Image (spheres, coloured by chain):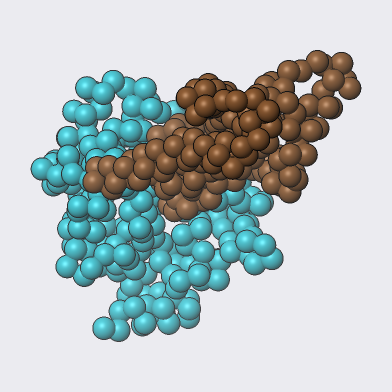
Amino acid sequence: MVNLTLADIIPFLLLAARWTLLLAAIAFVGGTVGAMLLLLWRYGAPRVGGLATTLFIQLFQGTPLLLQLFLVFFGLPMIGIEISPLAAAGIALTLYASAFLAEIWRGCVDAIPRGQWDASCSLGMNFLTQMRYVILPQSFKIAVPPTVGFLVQLLKSTALASIVGFNELTRTGQIVANATFEPFLVYGLVALIYFAMCYPLTVGSRALERRMRISR
Amino acid sequence: MPDEPVPPMIEMRHVNKFFGDFQVLKDVSLTVAKGERVVICGPSGSGKSTAIRCINRLEQHQSGQIFVEGVELTDKVKNIEHVRREVGMVFQQFNLFPHLSVLDNLTLAPRRVRKQSRHDTEALAMEYLARVRIAEQAHKFPSQLSGGQQQRVAIARALCMEPHILLFDEPTSALDPEMIKEVLDVMVELAESHMTMICVTHEMGFAKTVADKVIFMDHGQIVEVAPPEQFFSAPRHERTKLFLSQVLSH
């Protein structure tokens, strides 16, 4: 047993929380780009893209994230690609976030009335112009709450990266708890730090929603 | 050279279209000359909206041919986009872009499709808004306007692309009765400027005043094509007579 005071433990955990944030940021940015590509493929080439993106989404929604993480972490080295725990977790979470965000945003795009597509088509807009100036700006408004909701989940899901040995908040918590024999205190602090990271997102989302409601 | 015939603005040859097993258009053939104003009427479900939606490829036909200003509508995206730039459309539900101001609704396509400058397109937009008598609403959002005003904005939006042909898909059907006239007045003015127009409408008064020919459709077929005088006073087909007796009876 190691004697550590709260003043020792807290900075330790906060430093580890940076890695949690980094991983969440990678997954969110990667997932946003991935989901946007999936979305454009789906609507731009309904036949091939529709089928391929549905398959991709089903695959990642239908398997546990932990398993996806294992497949990347243990699978890539088998084909000769050595990979760090951070990279493995980043890749797995990006794919996972791409699938979920694509599905969330599909619903938001589908909620736009057919007449908006008709009108923009009839004005000679090509697909990308239509998406960029007519469909996505309208979808964005309804997409904010579910997207932030998913982002909160994603941030919490980064805890799974502890299992492949990535020293983020949860794994650091485990190490500290094992060293101090004070699991309740340490995991309690870990939970508080997760909460402190997620809560502002929810509040921010609500504020953004309110602002958009006023602006229109 | 002098014998070269002027190609029609729109030509549909033996067009067939299905929704699943249901045949919406049956062997529809139709030509529209430059400056011609055509009214299509018929009971609901007769395929009249679908027919005009085929002209700018909002719907695909399964067989037959459609030419717009000599360009055939096929799967070629380039042809489709070309045709859509030249063919404006006004919808029953207006379909304005709710997230954009009236002015931005008008300038979006000229700027992003025709690549004109913001300055030029705004001047053009104001001109057309004045023409549909709604210039003072330029900075409002569509939801702040009445139905009649929204439809006039939609007409101005279509005109901003300076199309050669305008399609109207029941433009007054979603309007309150007191607003129909303001929209029809704008349409009559357009007709008088010899814009090539096809209007799907139940406004028989409009058909009588401005149409060069009236087409009656039923069950996906063109039943009768006649100049309005003949169409209303001496329809040849039983189905036309029945339809007219129903829409003109009160």
Residue nearest the observer in this picture, A179 or B28: A179
Q: Residue at x 78, y 39 (%)?
A: A67
Judge from the rendering whether residue B55 lies leftward or rightward of residue A27; answer left or right: left
Q: Does B40 appear above or below B192?
A: below
- Give the x, y percent position of residue A158: 62, 34
Residue nearest the observer in this picture, B246 or A84: A84
Judge from the rendering whether residue B164 lies leftward or rightward of residue A15; answer left or right: left
Q: Does B15 appear above or below A17?
A: below
Q: On the image, which quarter does residue A29 sit in?
A: top right
Query: Among all residues in the image, which is located at the extreme left?
Result: B136
Judge from the rendering whether residue A59 lies leftward or rightward of residue B50; answer left or right: right
Q: Does A69 appear above or below B50?
A: above
Q: Residue at x 29, y 62 (%)?
A: B172
Query: Among all residues in the image, which is located at the extreme right?
Result: A78
Q: Residue at x 50, y 29 (%)?
A: A6
Q: Residue at x 76, y 18 (%)?
A: A83
Judge from the rendering whether residue B2 lies leftward or rightward of residue B120; answer left or right: right
The answer to whether any part of residue B108 appears in the image is yes
Residue nearest the observer in this picture, A36 or B218: A36
Q: On the image, which quarter does residue A185 sit in?
A: top right
How many dots with numbers?
A: 0
- Give the x, y percent position of residue B19: 62, 61
- Which chain has been coloured cyan in this picture? B
Q: Chain A drawn in what color?
A: brown
- Give the x, y percent position of residue B195: 30, 43
Q: Image quadrant for the N terminus of chain A?
A: top right
Residue nearest the observer in this picture, B100 or A86: A86
The answer to whether any part of residue B82 appears in the image is no
